[in-house]
Amino acid sequence: MNNEKLDQYLNKKVLLALSIVFVGILCVYFVAKASNEIKFGGRVGVAPNTISFDGMGEISAIPDIATISFTVRKDAPVVADAQTFVSTKISATLKMLKANGIADKDIKTDSYISNPKYDYEVQMGAPTSMPCSQDYCPPFVRKQTISGYEVSQTIEVKIRDTAKVGAIEKGLADLGITESYGPNFTVDNADLLKDQARAKAIANAKKKATELERELHIHLGRIVNFSENNYGGGPIMYAKGMEADTVGTPPVPNLPTGENKITSNVIITYEIR
C-alpha cells in the first residue's frame, strides 16, 4: 500500500472515530434532558407539576372624606335673567361652604349649561289632491319658536371634615337648593388600604402552602404564577331632595359614615419539586 492510499485510509478512520464520539455526546445529552423532564413529572413540552393556593385579606376603615354635588337650575323668558338667578344662588352657596371651612381647591364646577327651550306648532303642508289613507297623509310642517331659556350649574364639593356634612346639607336646604346628591363617604388614601389587604391575602395563601407542604411531605419550589382581585371600598350612598318651602327650620341631617371595607383575593401557584 503506497503512502497516498495509507493517508486516505487513516483519514477515514479518524472521521469515523470523531463521528462516533459526536453521536455519543448527543445521546448523553438527550438522555439527561429526558431524565430531568421525567423528574419533574412531565413529558417533552409539558410544564412541571404545580399547585395553587388562594388567600384573602380584608381591611376596614372609617371614611374620612365625603363628596356631595348640587345643581342650581332656572327657567326664564330672557337668558340673562336665568343666568343672573343661577349666579346669585351659586355665590350664596359658595359663601356658605367657605364659612364651613371648605377650601377653594375642594369646590369644583362639574357642569354649566345654558339652553333655549322650544315650542312646536304643527302646521299642515301645501294642499294636495291625495287624501289621507291608512298608510299615508299629506306632509306637515313643525314650526319651531323659542319659548324661554334654561340655565343650570352643578357644583361638586369635597368635605374633608365629615363632621360638617350635616351642617352643609342643612345650609343647602336653607338656601333653597332642591337638587342635591350625596354624600358619598370614602377613604382618602384607598391605595394604602389596598396594599395592606393584598399583604394580608398573600400571607394567608403562604400559610396554607406551608401547612400543606408539611402535611403532604412535598417540597414547593419557585412561584410560577400570581393573580389578584380587589373589590370593595365603594362609597356609602345617601341621596335626597330638599324642599325649599319646608315649614320651619329643618334639622341638621344625621348622616352616619359607617365603615368601608376593601378585600383582596389572591392565588399563588408553586412548582412542586
Image: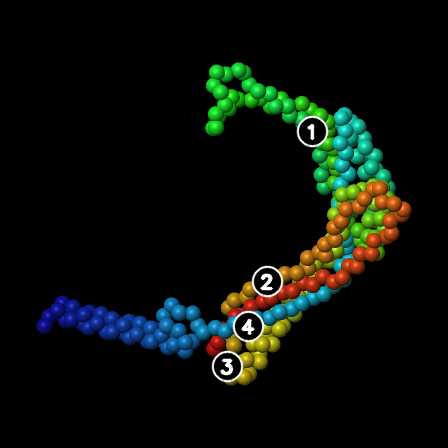
Q: Point out the image quarter for the N terminus.
A: bottom left
Amino acid type, mark 4: Phe
Residue at (63%, 65%) from the top-left corner?
A: 264
**Left or right for 186, reference 18:** right
**Disc 1 target residue:** 117
In terms of sequence position, does the residue under pointer 4 or pointer 3 come before the other? 4
> In the image, is 201 to the left or to the right of 252?
left
Label 3 close to label 2 by CB (< 8 Å): no
Percent x, y of residue 150: 73, 32
Name which of mark 3 and mark 1 comes first in the sequence: 1
Q: Nearer the viewer, mark 1 or mark 2?
A: 1
Q: Which residue is mark 2?
A: 229
The residue at the point 83 percent across, 42 percent down is 244
| Residue hosting label 3 | 218
Q: Earlier in the sequence, mark 1 or mark 4?
A: 4
What's the CA distance linking mark 4 and mark 2?
14 Å
Residue found at the far right of this picture:
248
Q: CA distance from mark 1 to mark 2?
A: 48 Å
What amino acid is labelled 1 in the image? Lys
